[in-house]
Image (cartoon, grey):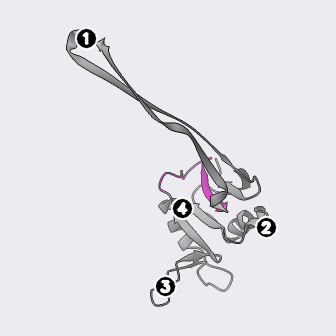
Amino acid sequence: ADSGVTLAANTAVTYEELLSIEHSVDPAYRQGASWMMNDTIFRQVKEIADSQNRPLFLPANLQSGAPGSLLGYPIVLNQDMASGSAAKCILFGKLDKFMVRRVQGITLRRSDDWNFDQFQASFVAYLWSDSDTAQANAIKYATAAS
C-alpha cells in the first residue's frame, strides 16, 4: 500500500488525521472499506471525540447485531501491526484488494546424511509465496512520527 498520511505524533492519533487517511483512499474503494490497527492504537482511537465531544468509535450494538465502527467503517484488529516511532500503524481501505499468491504447496525435504554420526535426520520445509496490493489506490497506511 502507499502512504496516506504521516501522523504528527507517535503516541496519539487525531480526528483530522483519521479523516486524512480516509480521504487518501480513492472514493471508488471506500464502500466496503475497513480500518486495520493493533489494540494499542485502537485504544488511542477509542479516546478521540469529535467537536461536539461525541466518541468517534461506536461500539457494537448487541441488540441489533451491528458491529463496532470508526467513522462508519468496521475495524479489524491485527496484533502483528506495529505501533510506535516511524511505524506503519493504521491501514484503511478495501483490504480484500491485498492478494497473496502461493506457488505450488509446501515442499518438505529430509536428509539422513547431515547428522549421520549423531544418528539424526534433518528436515527442511519451504513455501514460495508473494503478495501485493492489486489496486494501489484501494489501501493506504498511516505512518507514526519518528
Q: Name the residue: 73% across, 59% down.
A: 138
Q: Which of label 4 and label 3 is nearer to you? A: 3
Q: Upstream in the sequence, badge 4 or badge 1?
A: 4
The residue under label 4 is 41
Residue 12 belongs to magenta span: no
Residue 28, label in figure = 2
* Residues under numbered marks 2 and 4 in contact, where contact means CB atoms less than 8 Å apart: no
Residue lying furthest left: 119
Amino acid found under the numbered disc labelled 1? Phe
* Left or right: where 138 falls relative to 70: right
Residue at 59 percent of width and 48 percent of height: 85
The image shows residue 3 at horizontal and vertical percentages of: 72, 52
Residue located beneath label 1 in the image: 116
Residue 89 on image: x %, y %: 59, 55
For the residue marked with disc 4, what is the amino acid?
A: Ile
Q: Mark 3 or mark 1: name the one nearer the start of the chain.
A: 3
Q: Residue 108, located in which quarter of the rendered image?
A: top left
Q: Mark 1 and mark 2: span between their CA atoms?
A: 61 Å
Q: Disc 3 marks which amino acid?
A: Gly
- Residue depicted at 27% across the width and 20% down the height: 121
Q: Earlier in the sequence, mark 2 or mark 4?
A: 2
Residue at image mark 3: 65
Q: Is residue 87 magenta?
A: yes
Image: magenta residue range: 79-92
> Whole-Å distance between the Cαs marked 4 and 1?
51 Å
Local crowd size for mark 2, using a 10 Å CA cut-off: few (<14), some (14–19), many (≥20): few
Task: Tell me the element at label 2.
Answer: helix
Mark 2 → mark 4, Cα distance in angstroms: 26 Å
Classify mark 4: helix, strand or loop.
helix
Residue 33 shown left or right of residue 112 in the figure = right
